[in-house]
Image (tube, rainbow, N blue to C red):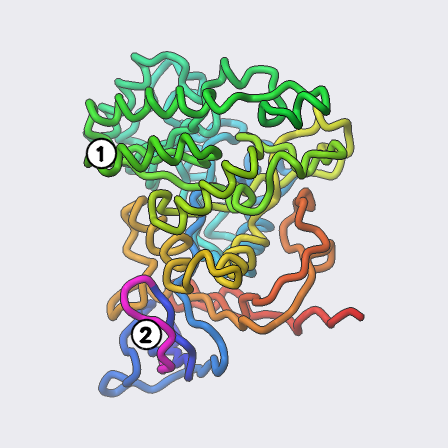
């Protein structure tokens, strides 16, 4: 591995680095020096980070890579490269593939394809139940041995509460966190957006907030009994954030994330039947969005994910109610995080906590901080680069995003994984008049 010296960057993390300018020294895939080179260090490569932010690499807890089974939408190669270009060094891959990631063979296929891409580290989540059908448990110990870092329902909640309780007991025995979708599939059945006055005006079936709170209440009760660490994925409501906060204050081993788009969009963005805003869980009210923002700011919700779901153009070029749900979010995770800093909701260290260190801690990973001996998973960001999100600047194969046309400030210039350079930026997109 190359020995790298990152020169004069502003170091930012959630563990004490708050913008001091210093050199960072990397050898053997780890951070071996901060400010001063270790004895005998000679750099094979130097990266000038003057005026740039040096952050831990982002860790994304919700990514659909579409491979195997839906290669026409995207692939492990394309999306891992897009992630690297966005400063993301590790992604948790959804088990909702075809075939489902419920056996060591499928897990090994995913990890092998990821190694061939030689880019962002893909960490498979194993299916909580066989074929994600919610009936039979998977061989959790075998999935862990194959490389799974978590178990997930893959966006298909387990309807049978007894099966879910046994799955949590099994996961606790094997020491794996369990990721649950926070919605009740029966209360969500037939819905396409948030239930409220906007859905009534548009004539679109709506999903009530109780679809989230009912699932949360069940999951919290089972988490308390099982002792498993339960992570609730993609919260969408003020009431859900309140319930989570109360459970954490009571000492339950639970955590949660929110999709980045939920912090910027609301049910009003569906007006005009914009199929790019068809997501699950749905975009909710302005009050819900503001409550989610506050929960992220005060740490009630510890992590922000992209909820990356790339689709081919035809999947969205249909009437709203028939469109496939999901947003291609991997390109906008970092720039929207920087926008939360610009808006004053988060400080830079707090943003790093939500995008880097907290997701790493949830999965029990050693990355996410700029400490000696930590893996050299790094993102070097020029915060002053202006650019526009369009089909030329999108790296993901999925162009299904409501943020097309938005102007952003800040992009990843370099991304390193384990001390290996996996992304170096092309010249910035030219300014437009």
Image height check: is 217 above or below 11?
A: above
Image height check: is 11 above or below 270?
A: below
Residue shown at the point (29%, 49%) measured from the top left = 361
Looking at the image, residue 116 sits to the left or right of residue 417; the answer is right
- Secondary structure of the residue carrying numbered label 2: strand
Residue shown at the point (26%, 37%) measured from the top left = 248
The image quadrant of residue 191 is top right
Relative depth, front residue between 51 and 34: 51
Residue shown at the point (61%, 44%) measured from the top left = 328
The mark found on residue 200 in the picture is: none
* Magenta span of residues: 14-23
Q: Are marks 2 and 1 in contact (CB under 8 Å)?
A: no
- Graded by Cα atoms within 10 Å as few (under 14), some (14 to 19) or many (20 or more), the crowding at tag 1 reads many
Furthest residue toward right: 433
Image height check: is 107 above or below 156?
A: below
- Graded by Cα atoms within 10 Å as few (under 14), some (14 to 19) or many (20 or more), the crowding at tag 2 reads many
Relative depth, front residue between 135 and 275: 275
**How far across and down, in percent of the image, does residue 146 sit?**
33, 38
The mark found on residue 252 in the picture is: 1
Instruction: Specify whether residue 97 is painted magenta.
Output: no
Q: CA distance from mark 2 to mark 1?
A: 39 Å
**How far across and down, in percent of the image, does residue 406 sit?**
68, 56
- Secondary structure of the residue carrying numbered label 1: loop
Q: Main secondary structure of the magenta part?
A: strand
The mark found on residue 27 in the picture is: 2
Quick one: label 2 or label 1, which is nearer the N terminus? Answer: 2
Q: Say which quadrant the C terminus sits in.
A: bottom right
- The mark closer to the camera, 2 or 1, is 1
Q: Say which quadrant the N terminus sits in.
A: bottom left
């Amino acid at each position: 591995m190359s020995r790298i010296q990152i020169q004069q960057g502003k170091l930012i993390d959630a563990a004490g680095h708050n913008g001091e300018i210093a050199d960072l020294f990397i050898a053997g895939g780890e951070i071996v020096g901060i400010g001063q080179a270790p004895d005998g260090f000679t750099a094979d490569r130097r990266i000038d980070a003057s005026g740039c932010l040096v952050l831990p690499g982002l860790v994304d807890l919700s990514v659909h890579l579409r491979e195997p089974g839906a290669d026409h939408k995207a692939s492990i190669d394309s999306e891992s490269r897009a992630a690297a270009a966005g400063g993301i060094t590790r992604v948790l891959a959804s088990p909702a593939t075809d075939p489902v990631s419920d056996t060591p063979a499928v897990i090994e296929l995913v990890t092998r394809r990821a190694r061939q891409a030689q880019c962002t580290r893909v960490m498979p989540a194993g299916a909580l139940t066989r074929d994600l059908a919610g009936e039979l448990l998977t061989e959790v110990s075998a999935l862990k041995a194959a490389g799974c870092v978590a178990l997930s329902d893959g966006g298909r909640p387990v309807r049978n509460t007894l099966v879910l309780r046994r799955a949590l007991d099994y996961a606790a025995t094997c020491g794996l966190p369990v990721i649950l979708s926070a919605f009740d599939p029966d209360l969500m059945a037939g819905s396409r957006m948030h239930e409220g006055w906007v859905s009534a005006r548009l004539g679109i079936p709506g999903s009530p907030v109780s679809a989230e709170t009912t699932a949360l209440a069940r999951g919290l009760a089972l988490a308390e009994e099982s002792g498993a660490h339960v992570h609730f994925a993609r919260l969408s409501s003020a009431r859900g954030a309140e319930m989570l906060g109360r459970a954490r204050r009571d000492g339950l081993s639970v955590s949660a994330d929110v999709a980045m788009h939920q912090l910027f969009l609301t049910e009003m963005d569906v007006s005009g039947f914009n199929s790019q805003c068809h997501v699950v869980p749905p975009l909710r009210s302005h009050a819900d969005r503001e409550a989610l923002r506050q929960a992220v700011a005060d740490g009630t919700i510890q992590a922000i994910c992209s909820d990356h779901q790339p689709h081919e153009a035809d999947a969205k070029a249909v009437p709203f109610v028939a469109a496939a749900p999901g947003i291609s979010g991997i390109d906008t995770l970092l720039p929207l995080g920087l926008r939360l800093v610009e808006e004053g909701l988060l400080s830079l260290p707090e943003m790093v906590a939500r995008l880097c260190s907290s997701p790493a801690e949830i999965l029990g990973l050693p990355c996410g901080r700029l400490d000696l001996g930590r893996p050299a998973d790094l993102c070097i960001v020029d915060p002053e680069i202006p650019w526009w999100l369009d089909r030329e600047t999108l790296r993901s194969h999925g162009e299904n995003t409501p943020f097309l046309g938005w102007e952003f400030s800040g992009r990843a210039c370099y991304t390193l994984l384990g001390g290996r350079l996996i992304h170096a930026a092309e010249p910035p997109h030219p300014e437009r008049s």
